[in-house]
Image (tube, grey):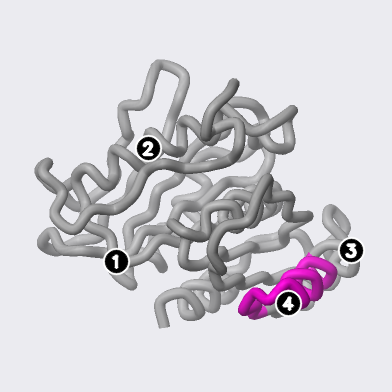
Amino acid sequence: MTGPAAAGRLTARPVAAPAAVPYPPGRHALALGPHDRAQLLVPAGPPRPRPLLVFFHGAGGTPEQSLAAVGDPATARDALVLAPASAAATWDLLAGGLGRDVAVLDAALQAVVARQALTSVAFGGFSDGASYALSLGLANGDLVDAVLALSPGFAAPPRLAGRPRVWISHGTGDRVLPVDRCGRRLARDLDAGGYEVTYTEFDGGHVVRPEDVAGALTTWLG
């Protein structure tokens, strides 16, 4: 694949007054193609400009798992949640190179901004999804205001744009992605690179904890 997707660049941008009818509250399956899936969760209440959290699942995960992890706490803060699915078992960056998953995400974002005014955009994820959120978020900091990474392994942005805020949590007992060479290293390197980094550790393994989701959302939304 060539073009912006192969370079990790997203072209979707929020507009002040979307022309299409806003999404009603609830969960929506976005029509992206026969093999491409994404779920959008819209908070209760009348249509209004809202923040958007794009959350990437871990390897072998699903959009439904993403929404189970972050849907309720995010919508309780009046944020929309977009949960895409990787085409393969994990995201394209980890499965051979950027391309298809970036293109699908861009299409999903285009569908959202066509109907929903946004006040802020954050990328988040767990495990492989956290590595993907960091990599795409740092490459699209002109769109993304914050990156919320739960137990990430690495960041490999194909380019850098903007300066999104970064929040990272990692378990000290993580045997899948050890904290010293993953979370701690990432926080240290990003801080040295001039990013505003919030880093927290917990006594546990490779898991998503509700208190970390709450901390991430608070760092992003205040």
Tell me what residue is drawn at x 32 percent, y 70 percent: 76
Can residue 210 be seen in the rendering of this structure? no
Question: Where does label 1 land, which residue?
Answer: 119
Nearest-to-viewer mark from 3 and 1: 1
Disc ID at residue 176: none
Measure the C-alpha gap from mark 4 to mark 2: 31 Å
- The local crowd at label 1, few if under 14, some if 14 to 19, many if 20 or more residues have their Cα within 10 Å, is some
Q: Nearer the viewer's eye, disc 4 or disc 3?
A: 4
| Marks 1,4: beta carbons within 8 A | no
Q: Earlier in the sequence, mark 2 or mark 1?
A: 2
Relative vertical location of residue 154 with respect to residue 94 in this rendering, above or below: below
Residue to which mark 2 is pinned: 108
Q: Which mark is residue 181?
A: 3
- In the picture of the structure, the residue carrying the numbered disc 4 is 191
- Amino acid at dot 3: Arg
User: Quick check: 30 above or below 48?
Assistant: above
Toward the viewer: 41 or 21?
21
Mark 4 residue crowding within 10 angstroms, few (<14) / some (14–19) / many (20+) = some
The spot of residue 86 in percent (x, y) is 57, 33
Dot 1 falls on a residue whose secondary structure is strand
Q: CA distance from mark 2 to mark 3?
A: 33 Å
